[in-house]
Structure formats: structure tokens, C-alpha cells
Amino acid sequence: MARMIPLLSYISFVILLIPLTLAKKRFSQRRQLSRGVLEAWNGQGDHDFMDEYAKSHFTPYYIPEGSLSLDDLDPVIVYTPIRAWSKGRHPSLVGRTMHISSATGARADVNFHGIGIEWFGSMSAKHGIAEVYINDTLNAKVDAYSLTWLKRQRLWGVDHLPFGSHRIAIVNTGDKNPGSGGIFIDIDAFVVNPGQPQGSIHPNRALWNDISQLIEPQKDRQSPYSDSSTLVPPQWSLTQSGETGVHAMQIAVVSATHAIIIDKVEHNPLTINGHPAWGALYDLRTNEARALDIHSNSFCAGGTFLSNGSLINVGGNPVVVDRTGAADFGDLNGLQGVRLFHPQLCDEGGAGCGIIEVPHRLRLASPRWYNTVVRIDDGSALIIGGSTRGGWMNNATTNNPTLEFFPPKNVHGFNGVPVPSPFL
């Protein structure tokens, strides 16, 4: 009996050790997954919730909160003539299926209620040109030609229709790009923005109305220096003339005709090279946007204009893996990013210029998240502080108490390297 007690203890120890070993192995695997990638401001997400395709590819297909996705098999989508359409299957498609047709005049109609709708489908070397109709009015022509097969692409969308019932129709024109080997069009999914009726009260506004009732009204508080009889109410109106295609986290007017818009890596409707764009050049005359190819994550970047008129945008965010629907946006770590835009290279139509970003050759001397940038009297940029990684707050563990310049310069022997500052 005395000999069995140590044996039982050993067996119990082994049983306890096995789960600990497995847990340690899983923890080690997670560390290996994130090795070399700093955690972003909202942390690293869990890879397990994503489908296998999203782990290795990023596509524009995304369902914003409150929107409704209609897969190609949804009965509200009417395909005519029915024999002109075939069903395709692939694990990378939305719901693994699509409807595809190469018949001239084949169409897909959807009646929807709301303020907007997006059409998602594929692009390939055998795809042709489709017409998009809203409420029986031709709205756009979409060329779905691409050298490579791109899936889950946002082929067209609108987001500012009057609240109410509408109809979208996608029609195969039978035309194609000269380089295309076919005239296919397909339907992978539609995403509907239900919106809300004009004049409805937003929940936050309703809350404010409740709070405002608790505040005693301020009566007879007119300034003694104003004469109400001479006051003229301002007359103005706000209209939407176009869409920027990317959110305007940062915006700057770069010429008399164009404005540049820089966002963080995001599910924006404007796409470039098969993935959502997070930069755009907006034409103030035509109200059209052209996607800019930014490589690194520009979230919380700083910027200024140099004396030669060029725009510099520096710093940013690490690569983010979160629950927005994709594991890989195709972006690079932006903490040391340097992005240059030369408006003087743009022609009258806004062509000939783009974001210049060469991370392996041109970058900041140290990581900077939420830095401050100002132009100084010699025309260069002074880049101040920031955090060495993304975070909800700055503290001693992430603070970057240094300055640097662009173009780099030698200041008190700090030749092109960060200059320590006791004030940061």
C-alpha cells in the first residue's frame, strides 16, 4: 500500500501536467502568430472566429452594423430570363455560391427599402460590362474586367437615396473591355442600407432631449451689445454632391481643384488593386474620387505641408487584426510610415500624382502613433512625440519623448536620429 501512494501521486501529476502542457503549447502558438506585429490600439483579435478565406485574403465585402446582406440565392433577387443564369460555387464566395450569366440582356432585379444598396460580385479576365439601373434610370456602367480573378468585390453602390422603396437592376450589356475574353457578369450578394426616415430622432438625440428638460432655461440672457432688431438669421443649405469613397479621418485641400483624403485601414467602398482603399483624391469640380494606393496603416498619423508644397503624412498604426470581418487588409505596419504626396505633379484632371510610400527605404527613425507634425521656418517638418505602439493612453512604457525632422538633419550631433526632449 505504501508503494501505491507515490504511484497514484505520479499518475495524478501527469494528468494535471497534460492540460498545462497543452495550454502552454497553445499560448506559444499564439505568440508565434503575432511575433513581429505590435498589438494595435484595440488589441489583437482571436483568429478562430474568421473563416478560412478571410484569414488569408481581404476583400471589400462587408456588412456594416444595421445593414442587410442578400446572398445570390435569396428569393428577393429576380433573375431573368431564368435560363440565362447559371449557379457557380466556390469556397471563397459569399455563401459559397453566385449567379453568373454571359447572355446579353440578362438581368437581376431587387426591390428594397432604405437609402442605399451595394452590389458585390467577381472580376476576371472573362468578365464584361454591366449597366446599373436605379428605379429604371441608368445610373452607371461597370466594367468587371481584371487580369486576375478577384472575388467578393464591391462593383457598385449608392448610399444617399431618399428613404423609401427602390429597385436596382443589373443588366448584362454584352459589351466588354478590349482585353477581356468574355462577357460574364455575376451576382454574389447585395448589401442594403435600411437607413431611417427623415426627421426621426437618433437615440443619442432623444437622450439629450430628456437631459435638457432637467436644465433650467436661460431667459433674458441677450448680450447688451447686440440689437435684436438688426439681427438677420443666416441663410444656408447643406447638400450632398458626391461621395469621397473613403472616410475623411484626415482631409486637406491640395489645390484649387482637388482635396486629398486619408483614412485608417477600413472597409471603405472605394477600392484599389482588389482591396478597399484608405486614401482618395477628390475632384472639387466633378465631385468624383480617385483611389490612392497607401501601403501602411495611416490611423493616427500626423502631417503637414513642406515649403515646396508637398504633403507629408507620417506615423500611424500597427497592423490590426480585429472583428471587422477580415484578418488581413494587405496593409503594412504604419508606426514608422512616411507617405508623400506631390500636388504639383497632378495635371488638371488630377492624374499623374499619387501617394509615394517605400517602407523599406523611406521611414521614420522611430515608431510614432498619434504624433504631432508642424512645418518650421526653414520649410522642413518637425515631428514631435507620439507613442511607440498603439494604445488607449500614453505612459512611460510606450511614450516616445523625442523629436525628429523631415528631411532628416543633424541637430546637436543627432544626425538623422531622434532628438531626446525633456518636455515630452
Image (cartoon, grey):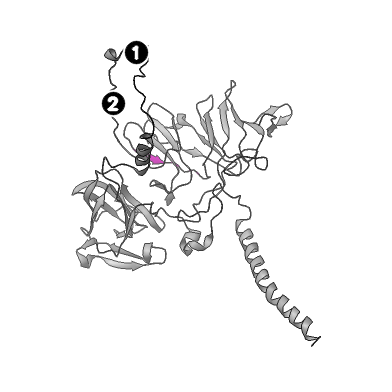
Q: Position of residue 277 (x, y in %)?
A: 44, 45
Q: Mark 1 Cα within 10 Å, few/some/many (few <14, many 20+)? A: few
CB-based contact (under 8 Å), mark 2 and mark 1: no
| Residue that numbered label 1 is attached to | 226
Which tag, 2 or 1, sits closer to the chain's start? 1
Query: Amino acid type of disc 2?
Result: Trp
Q: Quadrant of residue 352?
A: top left
Is residue 165 found left or right of 99 in the rendered image?
left
Residue closer to the observer: 5 or 385: 5
The quarter of the displayed image where residue 5 is located:
bottom right
Return the residue nearer the eye: 400 or 82. 400
Give the residue type at disc 1. Ser
x and y percentages locating residue 112 in the rendered image? 24, 54
> Does residue 335 appear to the left or right of 112 in the view shown?
right
Q: Regarding mark 1 in the picture, which secondary structure is present there?
A: loop
Q: Which residues are magenta?
A: 288-294
Write the residue at 62% across / 65% down.
Answer: 26
Q: CA distance from mark 2 to mark 1?
A: 22 Å
